[in-house]
Image (cartoon, helix red, strand yellow):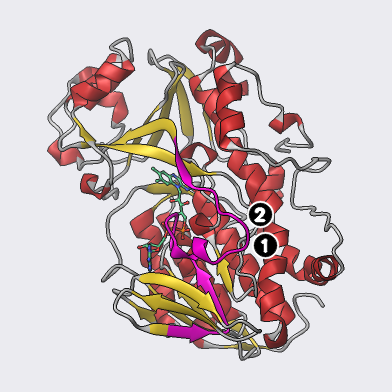
Amino acid sequence: MGLHDAGVTVGRNGVERYAPTRINVVICGAGVGGLLAALECYRKGHSVTVLEREPRMSIVGDVVGLNPAALSTIQKYPYLKENMPLKFHDCPISYYSYHGEFITSAMPEWRGSDVEANSGLGIVGQIITRPNHAEVMLAQIRQLGIPIVWGKKVVKYGEAPKDGPAFAETEDGERFEADVIIAADGIHSASREIVKGNVPPVQRTGYYAARTGFSRSDLPDLGPKCHHLFPGDGEADINRVYIGKSSHHVVSTSKDYKEDPSEGTSTNLTPEDVIAVMGDDWDPAVLKLIRHSPGSIVNWSLNFRNPHRHWTSPGGRVVQLGDAAHTFLPTSGNGAVQAMEDAISIAECLRQGGKENVGWSTQVHNVLRYQRVTTIQRTAFVNQDDLDGVDVKEALRRGPEFKVRWGRWMWSHLPEEYAADHYWDALTAIQTGKTFENTNLPPGHVFEDFTMEQELKRQKLKIPSGLKKNGDWTIA
Ligand SMILES: Cc1cc2nc3c(=O)[nH]c(=O)nc-3n(C[C@H](O)[C@H](O)[C@H](O)COP(=O)(O)OP(=O)(O)OC[C@H]3O[C@@H](n4cnc5c(N)ncnc54)[C@H](O)[C@@H]3O)c2cc1C
């Protein structure tokens, strides 16, 4: 069965909705993945309710990178198609040595490609603030009348022993039942207690991200040597990455960033704490910017959970999505992207299988997604080699050839079509105990599992990674 075999009707807000499936879905967590899962499940004809721990949508937060694969169904929502692109920061990523020497500047890899042209969104930038993203997604959810119940912290997941409904239990003792529960509640999701197999613990990588954000008006005049950090009227978007001294530093400016330094769960640092770790041989403009940063600097510990194969409960009625299923380090630039791909995939798998196959459909989704997600998780360590472990002289010599690369296979993926095209073959493979061969990997890639420990050891021994040589990771 393909994508266009069932009757679609034009529903609210011009969204084409597939015929009702009678599958009811409860989504726990209104984050990046949960919000899109709600929309996609609605569009596929399922009935949806979202539970969110917070009393309301947070209006603060940092930026996430999105690519055409994550946005591949946004054009199906006329409101989002018009409004989402307006929220993108359409600026290149510029690379500098830690001394401040310019290396190169590059727009997103997909810019000008047929992928972008076909996305139906027009220009696809790569950066969006979380609040802006949440705001448009939430507006669309409200327009479609999808209920979100705020202030509901889910503390327990379960399913009836024999092909029965699943439930999510909240802190205040309320129980929500559904044909399928999607646990989209982040890295600490209680769903880890019900999924098959042992879920590895979240561990510290030993890496940290010191981050702060502030309004331009709170910053004193830093003098002419810093003006290049605030070009034009001082409100233009810039995104600079300083590399090459066993750490990297990102300076991002825009008129609509709203950062709340208090959001961190880890310790706060002073500017001098940060500079003590960095060393004082960085670009003087960057050091000056850090020294005059108003407010505190949050020291995020970057934590990681080793990949685990099973994202579903034994009966398949509870399924993890996004960070609940797989953690990402920021250098992969893919945590939000993969949460959104998951959302698109699970909604289509549930539609393909119909109400009678709900428990199987989540497992098919898991099989279709696991190898792709695991491979992309690993890129975080490889990209880190490029940013932190790089020989600066060599990077300067390479100029335009130097940049962190993702590869066409990653951003040209269409998770909706992939789920529709492969659902039934994957189901047969699962039911007959055979291996399903995924094609959403780099062409020619031979999939390998990995652990964080292996990658950290490789980095320590300065052994180059072979990941991006395994299959075709080219851009063209
Ligand atoms: C410092 C940093 C930088 C990052 N940079 C990037 C980047 O450049 N590109 C990128 O793609 N990704 C990036 N990420 C990762 C990205 O933000 C996440 O991977 C992405 O948000 C995952 O989406 P999610 O829906 O799984 O989780 P989230 O977006 O975290 O949403 C989880 C939701 O669940 C709610 N929730 C939590 N617990 C409960 C509960 N018990 N009951 C009910 N609701 C609950 C939360 O309030 C939240 O709304 C970064 C992350 C960090 C920490």
Report x, y in % for residue 372. 68, 50
Is residue 100 found inside the magenta-colored segment of the image? Answer: no
Q: Give the number of callouts.
A: 2
Under mark 1, the amino acid is Asn
Q: Hey, which quadrant is residue 297 in on the image?
A: top left
Q: Is mark 2 within 8 Å of ligand 1?
A: no
Report x, y in % for residue 344. 61, 67
Residue at (32, 10) in percent of width and height: 281
Q: Is residue 18 above or below residue 336?
A: below
- Dot 1, how many residues are within 10 Å of its Cα: few (below 14), some (14-19), or many (20+)? many
Q: Is residue 400 above or below residue 3?
A: above
| Dots 1, 2 in contact, CB < 8 A | yes
Report x, y in % for residue 209. 36, 34
Q: Is residue 419 above or below residue 356?
A: above
Q: Is residue 452 above or below residue 96?
A: below
Which residue has dot 1 on it? 366
Report x, y in % for residue 223. 17, 20
Please tell me which residue lies in front, 245 or 401.
Answer: 245
Tell me if residue 263 can be seen.
yes
- Dot 2, how many residues are within 10 Å of its Cα: few (below 14), some (14-19), or many (20+)? many
Residues drawn in magenta:
176-204
Circle 1 SS class? helix
Give the image quadrant in which the ligand numbered 1 is located. bottom left
Quadrant location of the C terminus? top right
Which callout, 1 or 2, points at the residue further toward the start of the chain? 2
Under mark 2, the amino acid is Arg
Marks 1 and 2 sit apart, C-alpha to C-alpha, by 8 Å
Which residue has dot 2 on it? 309
Circle 2 SS class? loop
Q: Hey, which quadrant is residue 422 in on the image?
A: bottom right
Q: Hey, which quadrant is residue 110 in on the image?
A: top right
Q: Is residue 14 left or right of residue 475?
A: left
